[in-house]
Image (spheres, rainbow, N blue to C red):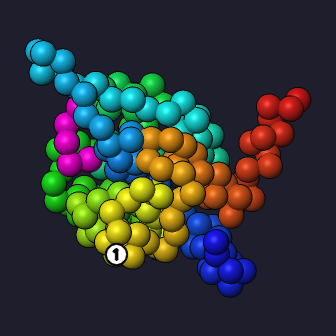
Amino acid sequence: MLDLVEQDLILAKAKKLRLLILDVDGVLTDGKLFFDEHGKEYKSFHARDGHGIKLLQQTGVKVAVISGRKSVSVALRMQSLGVELVYQGYDNKLSAFDELCDQLSLTADQIAHVGDDVLDLPLMIRVGLAIAVQDAHESVKRHAHWCTRLNGGYGAVREVCDLIMTAQGTLDHVIESYLT
């Protein structure tokens, strides 16, 4: 649990954000990889994570995916969520990060990254808000500014989206739209 000073610092960092970068395996999924006998890959995504992504995008914060693996299911899921910034097959995630910074004219402090394993560390030490999912590797947690309560693939991304919208004062408005 964060003390009030730490909580205020995280909210201040989240208030500046214009881009949320997500890893896939272990963040948007639980990290398990399923293959059928023909080599076709299957992934499971949490519906609340997807809805959180859609809501966050409605507030003007962009969402990107940078993954070390390539998967048709990721491309299809991101397309269904309206996420256009999808970088797959990037073992060196910094090249995609640099491209995003240039393309969107953003500085590192305007970007958050959610990761779970050591491939995410180069991004986590560069961004304004580094986030680890609850079941992330310990080295990732050590370099995170904030850690979710939930595990990857089980609503952690929704938790992050809600944090950003809370910091930016948009969460109540988004929820209100469902009450009218």
Residue found farthest to the top: 38
Crowdedness of circle 1 by 10 Å Cα count: few (<14), some, many (20+)? Answer: some
The kind of residue tagged 1 is: Ile
Count of numbered circles in the view = 1
Vertical comparison of 44 with 138: above or below: above
For this orientation, the residue located farthest to the left is: 38
Residue 16 visible (yes or no): no
The boundaries of the magenta stretch are: 67-71
Residue at x 19% of width, y 42% of height: 69
Which residue is situated farthest in the right direction here?
180
Q: Position of residue 15 (x, y in %)?
A: 63, 67
Q: Nearer the viewer, residue 4 or 87?
A: 4
Residue, x 40% and y 48% (percent of image)?
27
Residue at (19%, 24%) from the top-left corner? 35
| Most common secondary structure along the magenta stretch | loop
Image quarter in which the C terminus is found: top right
Left of 32 or right of it: where is 37?
A: left
User: Residue 26 magenta-drawn?
Assistant: no
Residue 70 on the magenta span: yes
Circle 1 SS class: loop
Residue 4 x/y as whole percent: 72, 80
Q: Quadrant of residue 136?
A: bottom left
Residue 43, visible in the rendered structure: yes
- Please, which residue is most extreme toward the bottom here? 5
Looking at the rendered image, the quarter that the N terminus falls into is bottom right
Q: In this rendering, would 70 be left or right of 108?
A: left
Where is residue 33, by image quadrant?
A: top left
Image location (x, y in percent) of residue 142: 39, 76
> What residue sits 50% from the left and 33% below the top?
46
The residue that mark 1 highlights is: 125
Q: Quadrant of residue 168?
A: bottom right
Indicate whether 111 appears above or below 74: below
